[in-house]
Image (spheres, coloured by chain):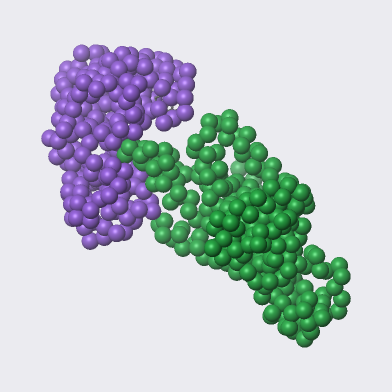
Chain colours: A purple, B green
Amino acid sequence: MAKSIDVSDLNIYYGDFLAVEGVSMTIPARSVTALIGPSGCGKSTFLRSLNRMHEVIPGARVDGKVVIDGQELYAPEVDPVEVRRQIGMVFQRPNPFPTMSIYENVLAGSRLNAKKLKKHAADEIVEKSLRGANLWEEVKDRLDKPGAGLSGGQQQRLCIARAIAVEPQVLLMDEPCSALDPISTSAIEDLIHDLKSDYTIVIVTHNMQQAARVSEDTAFFNLAGAGKPGRLVEMNATRKIFSNPDEPSTEAYISGRFG
Amino acid sequence: MTTTATTGKTRQRKGDLIFSGATRIAGLTILLALAGVAIFLTLEGLPALEAGPEKLQGADSIVAYIGPLLFGTLLASAIALLIATPLAVGVALVISHYAPRRVSKSLGYAIDLLAAVPSVVYGLWGIGFLGPQLVPVYEWLEQNVGWLPFFAGPASSTGKTILTAGIVLAIMALPIITAISREIFAQTPTLHQEAALALGATRWEMVRLAVFPYARSGIVSAVMLGLGRALGETMAVAMVLSASGIVTFNLISSDNPSTIAANIALMFPEATGLGVNALIATGLVLFVVTFAVNFTARAIVARTEKGNR
Ligand SMILES: Nc1ncnc2c1ncn2[C@@H]1O[C@H](COP(=O)(O)OP(=O)(O)O)[C@@H](O)[C@H]1O
Ligand SMILES: [Mg+2]
């Protein structure tokens, strides 16, 4: 189920503005890859180019190649809607559908894929996904209540449950803990640990301890200067990045000398 | 520094007082005007209870007089909303979510212009153009689906039917419903739209998952405002409708119920004595219906909004 991702020479634009330039990297399967870097360096932009969410912004486009399991993401015959069904995404701010119940939130993706879902199958997906997101015990008695009534951390786990309910190959997370308290954050970090045996996970984080705790590999992005596009400076095993990085600017960033 | 702060504070307090006084007066004025209208309509309408058939265009009592008019008003408005709502919501969606920015802007302007057209013009267009154009359609309806009571016929040869009136009213209600819906669609949080897209929703699925649930109560208010326009519209209906004061669901014949507003406009110039009171009584009924519509709309909006939380 999990797939590795090969990115080569990717340039990402907003209209005429080149936001991210020349990224090449290989993201291994069944492993957690963290993206770090100062704000504005294009981490979110890059992440959103991996499931073709970037292009929903008017004027936004990319050139270059992203290959997942031999399939080129930006080939002309590829339907972005299909891509997004295979690659789940969790956003910075929890965004369950406010009018839907917890139950229906989890099923939202499955209902798109298969219109007719038997009650029994639906129940199974809901329980499995909520268990997968470590939320089942907390909400099993109020599945018909609106998702918006949960706490921020629970809402974020509900969003993770919604994303994994369709069993995607890849899970993208954009600073999933930045709006959460420390306890919810640690619940989500535990969850990421559990999920990596099944999913290829890419997580953007501004918290370097978090990158060190959850990821196998880390990619450091940086801006060459004000107004210049963001670039990938270095990608290495997380242990190496945090102990003995190849690039001096990586060293400077993780030791807190800027950013 | 401290002194200026204190004087600033007191001055602001005085400003607050004046402002709150002004708003309170404005609010009271509106309430007084409303109450004044209600009292006037009631006092002037009550004597009509005694009116005889000669003052009620042949009806036996005021109730028998108002009934068909109320029926006609509601029927014409219902037709108008049935046509206008899906159209307006569709156009609003095209403007907010489908068309490229330049196209949607000009489309928006065009719709707004529709709102600026005086109702007499709609009336003229209705009798001069739309009605005659619809005659063959009505004939076709009578021949092919005449077994439905709505299209029993005989088809009007002038096109001056309640269906034509309903269509004209729909076009008049369209701009306001479109404008409000479009505003609300455009305000749907990006967060929820992206949540749907990231799950692999097509644009239409995204609209159903994120936009409609967010906009539901807004659409209800928009439709109610459109209904307000349709209920109270006078000139266009008076011109377009050939009314005979009957109660029927037959939408395409030349025997049609009239509406309260159109009836007042047509009859008032020649009304005398209790006839005037009778017309005012119908006005009171229209006033109450409009009030009830607004109340219901508010109740619906309040309930769906509570559901959102
Ligand atoms: N919707 C957008 N339209 C135009 N420019 C954008 C948009 N979103 C982000 N950018 C620009 O792209 C660059 C990278 O932003 P982003 O990917 O959000 O950075 P990060 O997530 O690393 O903080 C920034 O210069 C930002 O101003
Ligand atoms: Mg970001």
Residue B301 vs residue A194, the one in the foreground: B301
Residue B42 vs residue B280, the one in the foreground: B280
Expressed as whole percent of the image width and height from the top left, the position of residue B119 reads 75, 52
Residue B58 visible? The answer is yes
* Image point (63%, 34%), residue name: B106
Along the horizontal axis of the image, is A3 left or right of B260? left
Q: Quadrant of residue A250?
A: top left
Look at the image and tell me in which quarter the C terminus of chain B lies. Answer: bottom left
The outermost residue toward the bottom is B50
Expressed as whole percent of the image width and height from the top left, the position of residue B159 reads 70, 55
* Image point (32%, 25%), residue name: A78
Image: A53 above or below B78: above
Q: Quadrant of residue A53?
A: top left
Image: B194 above or below B170: above
* Image point (68%, 44%), residue name: B114
* Image point (35%, 53%), residue name: A100
Q: Quadrant of ligand 1?
A: top left
* Count of numbered circles in the view: 0
Residue A149 vs residue A99, the one in the foreground: A99
Look at the image and tell me in which quarter the N terminus of chain B lies. Answer: top right
Along the horizontal axis of the image, is A200 left or right of B284? left
The outermost residue toward the front is B143
The outermost residue toward the left is A197
Residue B228 visible? The answer is no
Expressed as whole percent of the image width and height from the top left, the position of residue B43 reads 77, 79
